[in-house]
Image (tube, helix red, strand yellow):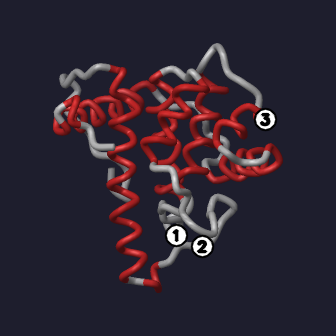
């Protein structure tokens, strides 16, 4: 995944859905590393500070954070794909918004929470997601509202878009060699 929307992948590529969290984590870790380097080298490109930005990057890695969310939220594997679509939607709509180590964790908990609430049959209240994500409840409420405005309240993901992202993640999973997905 680049700072641009994901490209169409090979729709015939299969992967174990249990790999979704490591694959999403690896893709986002690579994106954040590229963007952090770009922001460091070109301060004039620095994105606008939003409610998603932390003062300093959290100590927890993206992979460990997603594993924590997976363990405690019990979201379907589809939620992680949909959350990725939501994050890409922000990239497409807000050109000045750069995903970095300062905002990725809050973006993830918010996008996964919204995906679960919209798509899964079983989901939790905001206070529970706040606890999982390590943010106060009033902050997760503010993040949710801001996120919804950033994606223009467009929570429905068309099937063809979902399938395209799923196929692209399958390509990444196969490139990473399954068990060799980086932490």
Write down the quadrant of residue 117 in the picture: top right
Nearest the eye: 92 or 137: 137
* Pointers 1 and 2 in contact (C-beta within 8 Å): yes
Farthest top residue? 121
Secondary-structure class at tag 2: loop
Decide which of tag 3 and tag 2 comes sooner along the chain: 2
Tell me the residue at 74%/45% (across/down): 140
Q: Which residue is mark 2?
A: 48
Write down the quadrant of residue 11 in the picture: top left
Nearest the eye: 61 or 116: 61
Decide which of tag 1 and tag 2 comes sooner along the chain: 2
- Residue depth check, mark 1 versus mark 3: number of the one nearer the observer: 3
Q: Which residue is mark 1?
A: 96
Tell me the residue at 59%/31% (across/down): 115
Decide which of tag 1 and tag 3 comes sooner along the chain: 1
Secondary-structure class at tag 3: helix
Q: Which residue is mark 3?
A: 127
146 over 79 or under it: above or below: below
Tell me the residue at 66%/49% (across/down): 147
Secondary-structure class at tag 1: loop
Q: Residues within 10 Å of mark 3 (few under 14, many from 20)?
A: some
């Amino acid at each position: 995944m680049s700072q641009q929307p994901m490209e169409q992948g090979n729709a015939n590529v299969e992967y174990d859905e249990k790999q979704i969290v490591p694959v999403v984590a690896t893709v986002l870790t690579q994106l954040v590393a590229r963007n952090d380097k770009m922001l460091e080298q070109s301060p004039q490109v620095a994105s606008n500070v939003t409610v998603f930005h932390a003062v300093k990057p959290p100590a927890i890695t993206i992979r460990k954070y997603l594993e924590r969310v997976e363990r405690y939220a019990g979201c379907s594997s589809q939620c992680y794909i949909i959350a990725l679509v939501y994050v890409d939607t922000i990239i497409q709509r807000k050109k000045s918004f750069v995903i970095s180590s300062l905002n990725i964790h809050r973006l993830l908990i918010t996008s996964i929470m919204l995906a679960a609430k919209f798509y899964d049959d079983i989901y939790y209240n905001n206070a529970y997601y706040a606890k999982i994500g390590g943010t106060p409840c009033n902050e997760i409420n503010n993040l949710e509202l801001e996120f919804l405005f950033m994606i223009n309240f467009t929570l429905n993901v068309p099937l063809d878009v979902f399938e395209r992202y799923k196929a692209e993640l399958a390509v990444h999973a196969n490139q990473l060699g399954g068990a060799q997905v980086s932490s």
